[in-house]
Image (cartoon, helix red, strand yellow):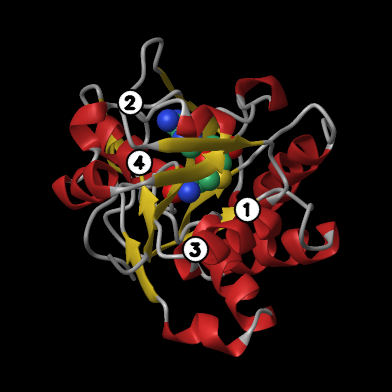
């Protein structure tokens, strides 16, 4: 058997949202690599080795996966949501770029999953029904000044926005600053939704205006969706019309 790597998205949490393609790769795998809580979502079985690792070791994890595949193993690297959205797919290609040339011939596939922003949008209604962008609010891999600049320019361009990694214990003040910038650019009436543990037990959805929004409404298990200037409520739903301008 020759080895391969699949970088797979497990979706936001609910097993019903794992694609059949991702499930098939897990069924054929000899090794599963990923952050501890994501590997914990994979059922153990004979012939399958689970390699849970801590957060923030993405490059080591990616090189480990490439080495195992080069040895002939069938490796699935798991991410939550989609592996291409602030997750392992880019880390794998960074390791591939820095690694030995013969890794370039490995059988590597990226298997998409349902990203948190889209799962949350579906729960809320259709807040991303017009043009939108996604911004990672963590300054782990980019300077905070760049995040502020992107928030302002995206707001000025009229995009609805999805925010990942909005607020962690290690940087509690930045999300308050992000809300301040958004209030300056969009005004207090703009709708903002906080979606925590989407599709998991204990899911919480909450929509308020920017004037009402407080930093405590978000944590690292929350994806935040800001509407555009036309985003509105209809009954219990939030939606953005298909037209603008
Ligand atoms: N690759 C993932 C994102 C990883 S970044 C994806 O495509 O969804 C981690 C961030 O994703 C979290 O801080 C949170 O903002 C968001 N997130 C992931 N799963 C979530 C869920 N079930 N509910 C709400 N937010 C989630």
Question: Based on the displayed image, in which of its 4 quarters is residue 52 positioned?
Answer: top right
Name the residue carrying label 3.
89
What element does badge 4 sit on? Answer: loop
Name the residue carrying label 2.
43
Q: Position of residue 4 (x, y in %)?
A: 36, 66
- Tell me how far mark 2 sits from mark 1, CA to CA: 20 Å
What element does badge 2 sit on? Answer: loop
On residue 10, which mark appears?
4
Between disc 3 and disc 2, the foreground one is: 2
Between disc 4 and disc 2, the foreground one is: 2
User: Badge 2: few (under 14), some or many (20 or more) residues near its Cα, within 10 Å?
Assistant: few
Name the residue carrying label 1.
61
Between disc 3 and disc 1, the foreground one is: 1
Q: Position of residue 100 (x, y in %)?
A: 64, 83
Q: Position of residue 224 (x, y in %)?
A: 52, 38
How many tags in the picture? 4
- Tell me how far mark 4 sits from mark 1, CA to CA: 17 Å
Asked if disc 4 and disc 1 are in contact, CB closer than 8 Å, the reply is no
- Tell me how far mark 3 sits from mark 2, CA to CA: 22 Å
Residue sitting at the far bottom: 101
What element does badge 3 sit on? Answer: helix
- Tell me how far mark 4 sits from mark 2, CA to CA: 13 Å
Compare marks 4 and 1 and give the one earlier in the sequence.
4
Please indicate, yes or no, whether residue 193 appears anywhere in the rendered image. Answer: no
Compare marks 3 and 2 and give the one earlier in the sequence.
2
Please indicate, yes or no, whether residue 72 appears anywhere in the rendered image. Answer: yes
Compare marks 4 and 2 and give the one earlier in the sequence.
4
Q: Nearer the viewer, residue 202 or 113?
A: 113
């Amino acid at each position: 058997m020759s080895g391969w790597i699949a970088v797979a998205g497990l979706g936001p949490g609910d097993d019903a949202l794992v694609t059949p393609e991702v499930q098939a790769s897990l069924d054929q795998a000899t090794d599963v690599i990923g952050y501890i809580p994501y590997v914990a979502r994979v059922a153990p079985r004979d012939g399958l080795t689970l390699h849970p690792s801590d957060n923030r070791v993405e490059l080591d994890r990616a090189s480990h996966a490439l080495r195992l595949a080069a040895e002939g193993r069938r490796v699935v690297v798991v991410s939550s949501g989609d592996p291409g959205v602030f997750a392992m797919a880019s880390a794998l290609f960074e390791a591939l770029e820095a690694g030995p040339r013969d890794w370039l011939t490995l059988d590597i596939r990226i298997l998409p999953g349902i990203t948190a922003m889209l799962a949350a949008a579906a729960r809320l209604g259709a807040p991303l029904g017009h043009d939108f962008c996604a911004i990672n609010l963590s300054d782990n891999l980019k300077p905070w000044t760049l995040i502020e600049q992107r928030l302002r320019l995206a707001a000025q361009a009229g995009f609805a926005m999805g925010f990942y990694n909005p607020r962690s214990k290690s940087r509690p003040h930045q999300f308050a600053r992000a809300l301040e910038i958004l209030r300056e650019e969009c005004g207090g009436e703009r709708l903002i939704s906080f979606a925590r543990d989407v599709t998991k037990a204990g899911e919480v959805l909450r929509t308020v205006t920017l004037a009402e929004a407080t930093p405590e409404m978000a944590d690292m298990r929350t994806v935040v969706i800001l509407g555009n200037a036309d985003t509105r409520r209809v009954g219990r739903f939030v939606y953005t019309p298909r037209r603008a301008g």
